[in-house]
Image (cartoon, coloured by chain):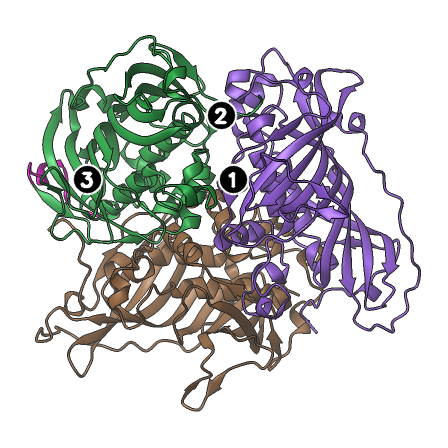
Chain colours: A purple, B green, C brown
Amino acid sequence: MKTNPGRFFEDFRLGETIRHATPRTVTTGDVALYTALYGPRFTVQSSDAFAKTIGYPASPLDDLLTFHVVFGKTVPDVSLNALANLGYAEGGFHRPVYPGETLSTVSEVIGLKESSNRQTGVVYVRSTGSDASGRTVLSYCRWVLVRKRDPEAKIAEEHVPQLAKVVNPADLAHALPPLDPAAYDNALAGSPHRFADYAVGEKIDHVDGMTVEEAEHQIATRLFQNTAKVHFDAVATKETKFGKRLIYGGHVISLARALSFNGLANAFAIGGINAGRHVAPLFAGDTVYAWSEVLETAELPGRSDIGALRLRTVATKNQACGAYPDKQGEGYDPSVILDLDYWAFIPR
Amino acid sequence: MKTNPGRFFEDFRLGETIRHATPRTVTTGDVALYTALYGPRFTVQSSDAFAKTIGYPASPLDDLLTFHVVFGKTVPDVSLNALANLGYAEGGFHRPVYPGETLSTVSEVIGLKESSNRQTGVVYVRSTGSDASGRTVLSYCRWVLVRKRDPEAKIAEEHVPQLAKVVNPADLAHALPPLDPAAYDNALAGSPHRFADYAVGEKIDHVDGMTVEEAEHQIATRLFQNTAKVHFDAVATKETKFGKRLIYGGHVISLARALSFNGLANAFAIGGINAGRHVAPLFAGDTVYAWSEVLETAELPGRSDIGALRLRTVATKNQACGAYPDKQGEGYDPSVILDLDYWAFIPR
Amino acid sequence: MKTNPGRFFEDFRLGETIRHATPRTVTTGDVALYTALYGPRFTVQSSDAFAKTIGYPASPLDDLLTFHVVFGKTVPDVSLNALANLGYAEGGFHRPVYPGETLSTVSEVIGLKESSNRQTGVVYVRSTGSDASGRTVLSYCRWVLVRKRDPEAKIAEEHVPQLAKVVNPADLAHALPPLDPAAYDNALAGSPHRFADYAVGEKIDHVDGMTVEEAEHQIATRLFQNTAKVHFDAVATKETKFGKRLIYGGHVISLARALSFNGLANAFAIGGINAGRHVAPLFAGDTVYAWSEVLETAELPGRSDIGALRLRTVATKNQACGAYPDKQGEGYDPSVILDLDYWAFIPR
C-alpha cells in the first residue's frame, strides 16, 4: 500500500514521536498570500522598515502563518481520520520566524483515551515546529477525536495528560528582541493604545466582518499543505453530516486575529495559546466577526519595553459582535464558532 | 473607544495632515499576486532580464500595485464612512518602486465642501506615498463623499480646490531611467507599435474580457490592506442599496489596464493620472472589458528615448467594446463603469 | 490594427520560428502561489534545507510551474484561435529552475495539416523555454486544432511530424544534480518507497479529491500569463458549446500531479512528457481525482542515485479512482479528463 490511509486511533502509541513530512521554506510569497487571504495590518509584520526601527532585524512572519505551516504537517499523520479537532493548550511561540527559514514539525503522543463506545478515541499530541537549525519556534498541544479502524482493537496504554490552563507569558517573552518603545510610532502602528490602556474585563467589538469564499479557504489551506479531505472535496463531503466542504478551523483563527487589529492594533505578537475551541463549523458564504475580552494583564520580568495581555477572542458567523455573543447556558450563542484564549505582547 | 469608527465629514480640518497606519514592504510575493489577480503582461514589469537590458536595475512594480498599496492605507482614515469615491486628479508616479521597498502614505486635506442637505460633504485629499527614505513615489488627489455624524455639525472652513485638468508628463518622465530604445525588443515586448505609431483620436478595442469572482476582488483588496467594509461583508451589504458586496474601484482600474496590453503593449509605465471616475459599480460575476482612445501625444524635453501618450481608457461590464461604449447624453452608456484619463510612457 | 487577433491556420508557415512575448522572472512569490493553488508536497521543491542536504543549491521550482510559464507565452501566438489542444509529446525538462531566473519561449512550427473540411487545421509546434543565458530549461511538442480565417486559403506546405512515442529518460537525467540518496530522509519526504519499490503494472489510487473554483483556475491561468479567452470570459463563453468558462488543461495536470504525492511522494522530479491528452473538459465546481500506473522502470547510465519511473497518470472528474476508470471501448470512461504519460525521477 503506497498511499497514506492515515492513522486510526489504535495505531497511536503513548510516548511515540512522529516526524512529519514536508519541511517548508517560508518566503515573502507566503507572507503576501497571508496578507491577501486575511488582511492583517499589524505594522511590525507589514513593514521591514518599522520592524527595524524598533529592534527587529526585519519583519517577522505573522505568528499564525507559522502556526498553520507547523500544524499543516501534522494532518497526514495525526488527523486524517479525525472526526473533530477538540482543543489546544500550552501553545508557545518561542522564536520569530523570518522569510527564508525552513520549518519542520515533530509530534509526541502525550495522551490516548478511548471513547466509551469504542468506536473512537481522543489522541493528545504535543507538536513542535523547528527551524533548519533545530531551534524550536512553536510548540503546542492539541487533542483530536480519531476513528478506530476496528472497534475491537485493544489500546496498549491510555493516559489523559494534565495540561496547564494558562501558559506563563514570562516564559515566552524571549521571542521578542528588546524593543525601543519610544521608536514605536503609534500613528504608523494604527493606534495610540498601549499596554497600560487595556484593563481586565474590557470588551472590544472588532466591528468589521469578512465573508469567506470556497476559493479563499482552499487556497489558504493548501498554502499550509494541510491535506484534510473535508476542506477540499465537494463530492466526498456531500455524504458527510454537513453535506459540504468544511472550512479549516485555523482559517477562522486567522480571520478573527486579523479583524482584532481594529481595537488591538499594537498587540502585534502572539505569545502563547492558553486554550482554543472550535465551537461550531464555518462554511463558505458565511461572514466572520469577532470580539475580544481582556482576561489578564501581565508585566514581564526584565522587560520594561513590553507587557502581555491575556485575551479571549470570540468569533461568530453571520452575527455582528456589538452584543458580545458568548457562552449561553451549557453551550454558546448559536452564532459563536471560536473561543480562543491567548497571550499577546504589546509595547508599554 | 479602542476601535476606529472612521472620520465623519465634520471631523476633517482643512490643511490637516494625516499620517496613515501600516507602512508596507512590497515584495516579489506581491508582484506574483498582482500578476495572478489581473494578468498584466507588460514586459518591463515581468522580466528582470528585459528591464536590465533597457536600463532599469530590475523590474519595477506595476505602477498600479504601488497605487493600490498607497491608496489602501488612506481608507481607514479618509473613506471608512464614504458613500462614494468621486474622482481623482493630479496623479503622478515619481519613482519606480522595487521589491523590498517600504511604502507609507500621508494625506493632506485640501478641500471640504458640505452638501446642501447637510447630511454629507465632499472631502478632497492629496495623498502622498513615500519610500522608507521619505522620497515621494506617488502623489494624487481624490475626493470622496463622506457622511456627517451629526447633520447639525458646523464646518470650520470650506474650500474647493482648483485641480489641474491634465498633469504635465514632462514633470513625471524622471520616474523612468534613461532607456535604450534599440535594446528594447519589440517581439519580447509583444508589439511593434511605439510612440510614433499612435495618433490622436485613435481608438483601440482591447478585445478580451475578464469575469470577476468574489474571492478574487477580496484577495486583491486585502492584499492592499484596504479595509472598506463594503468589499468584504455579505451580511452588512445586504442592507445597502445594492444588496451585495461592491468591488473596489481600483480593481476595475487594474483589470482595464491589464486588458489594455492588447493594443498598448509598449506603453508600459503610467506617468500621471489626469482624471478618473467610477461611473458605475462592479459586482462579482460581472465581466470587464475595456477600450482606449489616444487623447494626446507628447514629446518630452531631453528624452529622445520615450514619449508620452495621453490615454482615455473606458471599462465596461458585460459588454464587449467593439462599438466603443461611451458617454451618452448627460451620462454614459449603461455598460460603462470606469472613465480614466492618464499618461503612459512608451519607447520611441 | 494594434490588437492581436491571433494567428489562423493559414498564417503559420512550416519551419517558421516564433519568439513569444513577455519573458518572466519567476520568484518565490510564484512558488507560494503554486503551492496555494495545487497543494504539492514534494519535499525537494518545498524545503531549501532538504534540497541542499541532498545536493541541490536550493529548492528548484516545481517542474509544472516551469511548464505553465513557458507554455503561457505561446498562447497569444499559437492557440488564440484554437478549438482544441490535441496532444503533447517529446517533452523534456533539461535544467532545474530557481527563483530569480527569467524564462522566455520560442516555438518552431514543425507540422501543419489542413482538415478535410478545410475549416481548420492542425498546427504542430516545438516550444522551447530558456533562461536569460539562453540555456534550454524545457522543450516539448504540442499540436492544436486551429481555425482558418478563410476556408479557401491555400496552405504553402503541409507536413505531419513523426514524434517519438517515448522520450529516453537517460537524456534528461542531467537535469538533476548528483544526489546523495543516504541523505534523502524518507520520513521528511513522506514515503519509504523508492525506485526499487515500484513495479511495472502497479496501479496506485491517489485517493484524495480537489474541487476547483472559478477564482482558483483564473488566478492560476493569469499567473502563467496564459491569455486564452475561454478561461476568463463568462459572457463570451455563454455562446460556446459548453456555455461557460473552460478550465485550462494545465490546471488539471498540476492538480493530478499534486494529488499523486499520495503514493508517489519520492518521485519528486518530472523528467520528460511522453504523451498527454485532455480527454474531456473540466469546469468550475468539478472535483478532480487521479490514479497512476507504472508503465516502465528505467535505470540510468552513470546514475546510481536515481532511477526513472514511466508513469501514466489518469485524472477524472467527480469520480473517485478506486476502480481505476480508464479507456473504454473506443474511448474512455466518461469520468476521465486527462491521460498523461511521463517520466519521473526517484531516489534509489
**How far apart are the alpha carbons under marks 1 and 3?**
34 Å
Mark 1 vs mark 3, foreground winner is 1
Residue A95 sits above or below residue C61 on the image: above
- What is the three-letter code of the residue carrying label 1? Gly
Q: Position of residue C46 (x, y in %)?
A: 59, 50
Given residues C329 and C45, the one toward you in this image is C329
Subunit that carries the residue with mark 1: A
Q: Which residue is mark 2?
A: B5
Name the amino acid type tagged 2.
Pro
* Relative to B334, B140 lies left or right: right
Q: Quadrant of residue C9?
A: bottom left
Circle 3 chain: B
Magenta-drawn segment = B190-201
Q: What amino acid is at disc 3? A: Thr
Q: Is residue C132 visible?
A: no
Q: Secondary structure at mark 3?
A: strand
Query: Is B318 located above or below residue C258 in the figure?
Result: above
In space, the residues marked 2 and 3 are separated at their CA atoms by: 35 Å
C32 vs A6, left or right, is left
The answer, for residue B14, to whether it is visible in the render is yes
Overall secondary structure of the magenta stretch? loop
Mark 3 — residue?
A: B313
Image marks 2 and 1: residues in contact by CB distance under 8 Å: no
Q: Position of residue C108 (x, y in %)?
A: 27, 63
Kindly indicate whether the residues beneath marks 2 and 1 are on one polypeptide chain: no
Numbered disc total = 3
Q: Chain of mark 2?
A: B
Horizontal side of B36 relative to C265 (left or right) equals left
Residue at which label 1 appears: A209
Query: Are dots 2 and 3 in contact, CB under 8 Å?
Result: no
Label 1: few (<14), some (14–19) or many (≥20) C-alpha neighbours in 10 Å: many
Q: Earlier in the sequence, mark 2 or mark 3?
A: 2
